[in-house]
Amino acid sequence: MGRPPARRLTTVEDETSLSCGLRAPPLLRHHGLMAKPPMPPPTKPKSPKRRALTHAQPRLRDPVASVASPSAPDDEALLPPLFHAWFTQRGWQPRQHQLKLIAQSRKRRSTLLIAPTGAGKTLAGFLPSLVDLHAQKPRRVGEARPLHTLYISPLKALAADVGRNLMAPIGDMGLRIKTELRTGDTSAAVRQRQRLKPPDILLTTPEQLALMLSHADAAHLFSGLHTVILDELHALAASKRGDLLALGLARLSRLAPTHIRIGLSATVAQPSELRAYLQPQPASGDLTLLADHIEIAGGAAPEITILETDLPLPWAGHSARYAMPEVYQAIKRARLALVFVNTRSQAEAVFQALWHINEDGLPIALHHGSLDAAKRRKVEAAMVAGTLRAVVATSTLDLGIDWGDVDLVVNVGAPKGASRLIQRVGRANHRLDEPSRAVLVPANRFEVLECRAALDAAACGTQDAVQSRLGAIDVLAQHIWGMACAAPFAPDTMFDEVRSAAPYAMLSRPTFDRIVDFVSTGGYALRAYERFARLRPTDDGKLRLSHPRLAQLYRLNVGTIVEAPMIKVRLGGRARPGRSGQPRILSGGRVLGEMEEWFLEQLTPGDTFIFAGEICRFEGMRETEAYVTRSKSVDAKIPSYAGGRFPLSTHLASRVRSMLADHSAWSGLPLPVAEWLEMQALRSVIPDPGEVLIETFRRGHHHFLVAYPFEGRLAHQTLGMLLTRRLDRAGAAPLGFVASDYALAVWGLGDLNAMIRDGRLDLRRLFEEDMLGDDLDAWLAESAMMKRTFRMCAVIAGLIERRHPGKEKNGRQVTVSSDLIYNVLRQHEPGHILLEAAWVDASTGLLDIGRLGDFLRRIKGHIRHQPLAHVSPLAVPVLLDIGKEMVFGGSAREDLLRLAAEDLIREANEE
Amino acid sequence: MLSLASDRFDPRDGATHGFAMCGKDFVADTSGALFWPAESALLVADLHLEKGSAHAARGRMLPPYDTRATLMKLAEAIDRHQPKTVIALGDSLHDSRAADRIADDDVRILAMMQEGRRWIWVTGNHDPHIAPSLGGTVCDHLVLAGISLRHIPSDAHVSHEIAGHYHPAARVSLYGHTIRRPCFLGNGRRLVMPAFGAFTGGLNVLDSTFDPLFGRDGLNVIVLGQEGLYPIATRLLRPE
């Protein structure tokens, strides 16, 4: 297969490097994955994207000069008459990109198709396979044929949906093509049969692909593979699931070298990342190959508005309760409205609020990831059937599932990212030529700014930059274990195979060897486990699994999604005190859904909360289930239940900062917001876009420091932890802090104004980048978030096992908790590869250290301090969050015990 | 009675907490050890040495540092209290082959700690036999100054007993936040020690397992923190 001549793009040097700020623990510095660059955007990477972990760019090679204006393919030659007839019969015409993909498939070229919702993307992806299968001799009864096409989707619901939609062309045209679904719900017997007698088209998920590849018969199963279709690739690629999938694809390239990949994606900021993802990468490592790419421009521009209301805008909060009457009116005017919210608690609160004012008895439903699956299916079916008028939903409905005739999207709260907004808006009107209609409902004043920024971004068609990522260490460990389950492997060959996956193209050999060693013996410096090694050398220099039981262990733990432990919530009978005074819960009752363990464990019997659209009274836990009863109370203690909250994207944050600084733009804002900003200018100051404003003032008995970095909640929380430590050392006696997406407030007993005046506290020193050194390190030792991150890595890498529901009774005594492992490792082997993995994750994930580092660098010399006599208008929202948000880090846990003990002493003294 | 000496209680004070049981004074150590000054005896339970390697032998490569971590913690407690006798209340070894897997250096550390003092291994269900290479005296049950010392607590509602085996842990909930820590569990007449080993988990003190031992009322719970020990009221305890 000849390739067109290479076109070299210029090498781009990126100024940022690891050494100038983002300080890794000493032993992490020379880690091969970190020092090597990730995939760059193809051209002009002018904006300082978040690339703290890189220092150089590899060269790019674009095998196809341009697919933007290819000659129109010959329709007749590409599409068989039967297919033409089918299109005509439906009153359709094959679209250019659909035909182009068939041509690409004929040429055996992997291709990325970027198209907005409603462009017939999914059909386009399948057409080449349908046409090719149609041309083959029909299968005789009982004849086994190799698998032809593998379709991979991020959601099993999407796979099922696509499977259903595929039945239409196959059925209508009478094609003899067998399609089947394979998900975690597929029975073991069917899965086994699918491996022996595969269908023509198999629809599945990345985890199932990993499982299939871990069997010895994978080589046979995939030997005839023709095409892999990757749906919603933008949602998959830049994640650990994407890494797992990339490694699976690399293996498929070995098993079926001639297969091609078709990627389907929504519009993204940097298509080259996805194009590289689709293309096997060369072993040399200094070139990046890109798959071809077809991009369909968006249809009619979406009509997005911000909800106009005469009601006063709330200062803080996320429920947008004030706007519900207007939202209700909008729903009434629409045929079918999708009401998107950012968190499950918001979903519950909005649903309750709408239900209260639903005078017309409109059929409004609730849909979020915690609800019982059967309940969700019911809602989805009702949507498709058109019997609903509105659905309140979280991101579970974000992805491209076709749920029927939605003509209005309402986004409650700020969208947090420009791309998310576009995808959500795309849910309305699945026709390219009609504009989709959406209303943004800001829940508080800052969100007005954010909604406006998102709207501007949508108008300019700008997207959030997806952060370049390097393949995760823990995922590679899992994959190597899986490959050892399939067959013995030679490390040299495996290394080349792994590097052919774009996320791992820059993997260094020493790092690879350490990961193999980790899989085999745990990779400890103390070589204590050689005799228990899971991988043993064979005579021909390969490594083989030392015991078949290890393959079972692998299969139980495959996948990269490590959920917070979930607990079933069951509706039970009313509790009555039993003989011993213990509450007695009647068993039985239906399951309402599942909730995170940490939320339920903070409830005491009698607490009320909203779940599954009902006000529930918590009765107690029984084994691994929580029992609730229906409550008659009107008001619930609404859960501070943050499941699925996204931080503000960097792109939107910078837009909000500029908007704030641009006085002339304020006139376009709702009056209360404009007035609020005017007041801020009068009472304090409005910072320039390049500056960070820091206000210090006294309020009540406490002294406050409020900073406005606009870097998102996660980075602010980390900053809050580190600032508190530093203020403590400076003698400012900090007591606590609270972080929002926009601002951060620390309060304490020390008079900050006086301290700054006397020079006892230097703000420049306080915000010095070196806080990411020892302070961070010391804090990480006890950080609950770091421990959570470590736990996820440890599960994915196969060091500890997943918690399987129902198997955990009294299990705590037997299993070794990841916290204990974390402590022991930190103490005895701080350079262990799994600690590195956790650190890399934390810097982009829960702790967002990468973003914090960028911020600290950005504000150097740009701190605008404003001492005040009282609270400023801009500070009010974050101060209102005090008490609602509480972050627990290191010593706070000890404080909790101290308080609990003091409570007992008080009680003892009173008696 | 295991009573709270509230006037003396200041967790910032240090890593120990004194209390009385059956008329005798004890000092709980934040490491999870119990010091008995009158007998100059240091009691520890459930060391589970070589738990990491026991998992590794079955294909789960947990860090091999647990034995060292446990022994070093024990060494610190010994330094603090300088006991004439150390008594390990069973499950000192995670399994019967632990003595084959333990590193020579760890055996040497053990021998150093045993020098100049009495060392008694009470056997447990995980370690019915203790290899002579580990030193010390082995017995399955011991009575010291009228207090019965054993691994598994007696079923009956007895008094004058200190045991281990169950790894008691408390879940404490306050202001909407919950933490889980190992603890001493007693009722003034008997005591169950927390597990001392670095990789040992815990069983919630509200689990029904403890019912026949203590009944539900009158539980005294002293939670191990990182900087001190904290007596906690039962109403702040949460089940799993």
Image (tube, rainbow, N blue to C red):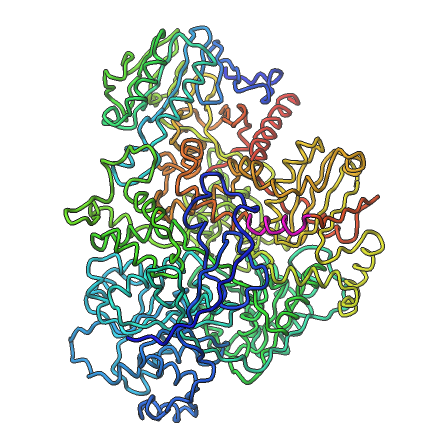
Is A854 colored magenta in this rendering?
yes
Q: Is residue A858 above or below residue B203?
A: below
Comparing A171 with B111, the one in front is B111
Q: Is residue A624 left or right of residue A144?
A: right
In percent of width and height, residue B50 lies at 31, 28
Comparing B12 with A569, the one in front is B12
Q: In this orientation, does residue A163 appear?
A: yes
Residue A261: name its quadrant.
bottom left
The quadrant the C terminus of chain A occupies is top right
Q: The magenta stretch spans which residues?
A: A848-860
Q: Is residue A74 above or below residue A572?
A: below
Residue B75: name its quadrant.
top left
In percent of width and height, residue A141 lies at 16, 79
In percent of width and height, residue A729 lies at 66, 31
Q: Is residue A738 left or right of residue A14?
A: right
Is B38 colored magenta in this rendering?
no
